[in-house]
Amino acid sequence: MKTVSKRILFGGVAIAALLTGTAGTLMAQQKPVIATVVKISGIPWFDRMNTGVEAYQKANPDVVATQSGPATADAAQQLQIIQDLIAKGVNALAVVPMDPAVIEGTLKRAMDRGIVVVTHEADNQKNTQADVEAFDNSDYGSALNVRLAECMGNKGKWTTFVGSLGSRTHIQWVTAGEENAKKHPDMQLVDPNNESFDDANGTYEKAKEILRKHPDIKGFQTSAGNDVLGVGRAIDEAGLSGKICLVGTGLPNPSADLLESGAITAIGFWDPQKAGMAMNAVARLLLEKKQVVDGMDLGVPGYEKVTVKKGAGDGLLVIGNGMVLADKATYKEHLF
Amino acid sequence: MHKTGEQLVMLVVINCALLAVGAGISGGNFLSLFNLQSMASQVPEIGLLAVGVMLAMCAGNGGIDLSGIALANLSGVLSAVVLSSFMSSVDNELAFSLSFMAMTVGVGLVGGVINGLLISKLNITPILCTLGTQMAFMGLAVVVSGGRAVTVGSPDLLSRIGNDMFMEVPISFLIFLAVAGLIAAALKFTPYGLWLMMMGSNPKAALYAGFPRTGIIVSTYAISGMLSGLAGMIIAARNVNVKFDYGSSYLLIAILVVVMAGVKPEGGYGRVVCVVLSAVALQLMSSLLNFGGLSNFVRDFAWGLLLLTFLAVGRYDVVGFLSPFNRQDNSSVPRPQAPKPNN
């Protein structure tokens, strides 16, 4: 290597060493830091959650609440962010895991270092102190069906859509729906559990088939986020808006047109904003060494009276009542 | 010699600068022992894959290994599934750990040999061949695991590799350094290293000179595969669970690391020490941005900027330009220029 190169090399090392020496450890932060880590940043769902974290920060100036997430949908990237945050020395982590299994080891290390760990949308996460869920899946399924039955006048043929037969929550929702429908003997379930694969076009084709096969069908209960769009379009094109009832999981912004036209009766969802606030609220309680108990009020709409159960590991499962059912009249309150 | 030293200097300076900036914005926290350990334990996964890509690139003829991370996941998933049907990771901790380590590297080796044979015997372009095997490896991992995460557990030895320190340095990082050192030595002191670089510089001349082309290519991809298997073992040791789609973003990052390290994409030149430093630099930068609480989209931007900087350094004599002594040096001591092989 040439002498000049060497000189620069040593110069660089010397400067680095100097800076390292002068940079003291003065910046010890007094306020506890709660870091929210989401699956992926920059998509509407988690942008909405960010507004919740910001609102929580505003309401609680004595903590520092921030949100970050990977730019690509990769569990490994999320893992690195969590690791860096642990090394940075945050006091609490509120994680929405991309893949609960992959981050188990890291979350355990975090808890071993005394960091509070809270998760969301991961009721199978073992290494967490509390997993916050927006609602009980059975309650949500029956609530969708109650709305559907009301629209159908408690009678007529109806069917269900799930994302895939393997998706656990969707099956829980439609099973709870079927339970509820048994209360109304005139409601007749036909060809249940159609798989939509969360694809609006595929769902549209399938819904058209069902409309041909059962011209007298009265209701649809759907599960995956894009199902209402596919089924709604099929109903709309058949000129049956308002005559056939459609209730399912969906988001307000994409569903707006079909809600207006009457093709979608109502959509159900939970608000990530409130979920973000609830996670931070639980993290704060745990930071202050307070107990999270059954029937507690987290101070977040939809989480005023939470159910607390034992989780998959040693932690708690905190279930709110954060479901939102919105129809033509009310969806504008939740535009995201 | 002149240019290679420059790349190394540049990398060292950048690493130091990143450490200094980190210390500055975090008030010294960035240089705490715990964070240094945390960052060091994150480097091996990507570093091992990058060394594999480097070897493939050095082989020339458009050599590249895209199947790295898929093979790493496959080795982890396959070993976990097969071994847990034989023995429990709780009862025979040592036996399970040892056979898991052997099997991950073994699966990696087999995968690499397949790549090498396809490329050398069937003359498939490396980028297409490894793209195909990447999908095949990933698909096989999906089939074997049923698309779910597979639990490896934390038997004593394995969990130590993933989590413990030896003299305050993470064991996984030491393994990475040892392996990198071994490969660097092989490239420098064995005929294989010479053949690989010569073949990369001029495949035709190498052919007429009677180099064992098939042998070189197969062993290159086999080593790359073994490195992937090792990465799979470290991933499993750290994360307790393995899954087929872990680290899907690593593919491009590994290539980024290699290009930043000054490895010639057309083959024939690459230094392991530069790849190691370049992997460390990327890690420092990404941890730095996480420390600063900046968006991860900024990270992509910063990586791109870093890459362009390095390309500029490679093309123009930036270090020389910055130092007036350098020019004098050049004029007063005329150096014989090495004849350039093929351009």
Image: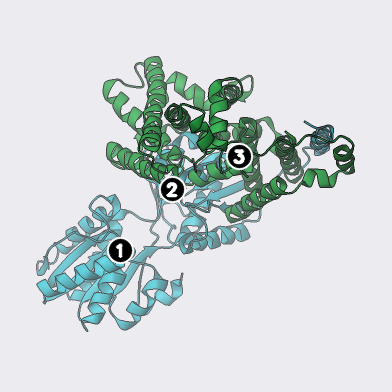
Identify the chain drawn in cyan: A
Nearer the observer, A104 or A148: A104
The image quarter containing residue B96 is top left
Query: Mark 2 and mark 3, same subunit?
Result: no
Q: Residue at x 24, y 75 (%)?
A: A234
Marks 1, 2 in one chain: yes
Q: Is residue B233 above or below residue A74?
A: above
The residue that label 3 is drawn on is B263
Mark 3, mark 1: which one is toward the viewer? Answer: 3
Q: CA distance from mark 1 to mark 2?
A: 21 Å
Question: Which amino acid type corresponds to the residue marked 3 in the rendered image?
Answer: Val
Q: For residue A57, which quarter of the picture?
A: bottom right
Drawn side of residue B283 relative to residue A123, left or right: right
Pointers 3 and 1 in contact (CB under 8 A)? no
Describe residue B130's horizontal placement relative to residue A188 as left or right.
right
User: How much space separates mark 3 and mark 1, taking CA atoms?
Assistant: 43 Å
Mark 2 residue type = Met
Q: Which residue is mark 1?
A: A199
